[in-house]
Amino acid sequence: MPNRRLFDNLTEAQMIADMEDAFRESKPFEPCTFIDHIRKHYHKDISRGWEQSFRDRHFREIKLYSARPRESSRFNATHEDTDRYEQELAQYVVGTDINFIFHIDESGDQPWVDAHNKCLLCPVGIREDQCVYKVNRSQKNYTVMPCINIAGDTIPPLIIINRLTLDPDIYDYGLRPGVDCFITTSKKGYMNKLIFVWWQENIFIPKLDELSSDRTVRAVLLMDNLKSHSTVEALQIMRNANIQPLFISKNSSHALQPLDFSTFHDLKSKLKKCNSNFEKGTQAARLQNLCYSIEDVTTTHKNRAAYLHVGLRMLPRSNPPVAEINHESLNARLRELFVLEQ
């Protein structure tokens, strides 16, 4: 019996559904792992030749892409949550002074293990840059959290390192604490609720006070749904300071967060080319490279462009300058979240 008749049409349709589910979970199949999946779940001993003929038969539904690594898994966004986000944009962002609409996001800086391009099975219609896979993290993480507003201004970034002490030489080549960056430590190098509260009270709120002593002016803080961002204490601090938190819909930060969509891509490219005055790999070298690189990718023009990519901009000829939604750009980003439904 020819290989193509090992399974009937209904069974092969289920295999395609398995492949699409794996893609949605950011665990797409390689040809070899797809073969293993068939052997395990469909109880047939198939060959690489059968896998090739399967792709040939279903060329309208699946395709082999060269995929790049990604540091974290993406899951499905929901229409309910994206609708909520759109409504809150209209309620809290539209008509608000662009100097008071801020966005924060965290990005990790760490060596990657086994991070190289792979050939993966993906649904037809997926752009090649959407075909990515999860890689294992190393344990040498630093986190950088920039803060930008629609006007294009930048608050010095917060950097969190995965040590409980700072080396004494980190400021030897002109790095200025509180001017170029703010540096703190945590056991694993990640954001936590204590650090976020400290950032609110010691960095963000004082910046708002500089912009206006009139705290009746409401500020907006656009961010993802990280647990440390939405603790009872953090939310209370924002209420007391007249800051409106606006949480981007879950599992959509790669499409809707200004920093995630464009800035962090440029940051990783800069870091690969950065040369420090310090010995490579040391705490001081990594901090210096992070500060210099984040400064390069958060210029006024690039910050404004980051917001434009996700559909937020200044209303033309408004005085004072206020924000509006560019629905064409926002809808394009939303379509990317639900591309498999199209």
Image (cartoon, rainbow, N blue to C red):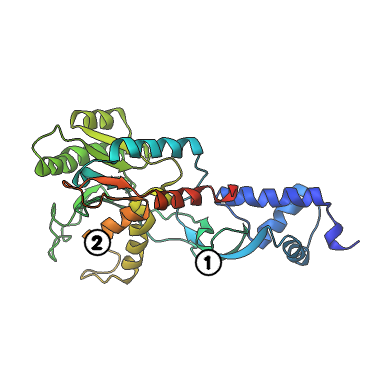
Residue 16 makes an appearance in the image: yes
Coordinates of residue 245 in the picture (x, y in percent): 29, 36
Q: Nearer the viewer, residue 107 or 187?
A: 107
Q: Residue 114, position in %: x, y?
A: 50, 63
Tell me the quarter of the picture where residue 264 sits: bottom left
Q: Quadrant where the N terminus lies?
A: bottom right
Q: Residues within 10 Å of mark 2 (few under 14, many from 20)?
A: few
The kind of residue tagged 1 is: Asn
Towards the viewer: 269 or 280: 269
Looking at the image, is mark 2 or mark 1 nearer the viewer? 2
- Give the residue at mark 2: 301
Residue beneath disc 1: 117
Q: Is residue 307 left or right of residue 238?
A: right
SS state under label 2: helix
User: Spatial distance from mark 2 to mark 1, Cα to Cα?
Assistant: 32 Å
Q: Nearest the camera: 239 or 200?
A: 239
Q: Where is residue 282 in the image (x, y as percent from the top left)?
A: 27, 63
Kind of element beneath mark 1: loop
Q: Which residue is drawn at 32% across and 56% down?
A: 306
Q: Is residue 222 left or right of residue 24?
A: left
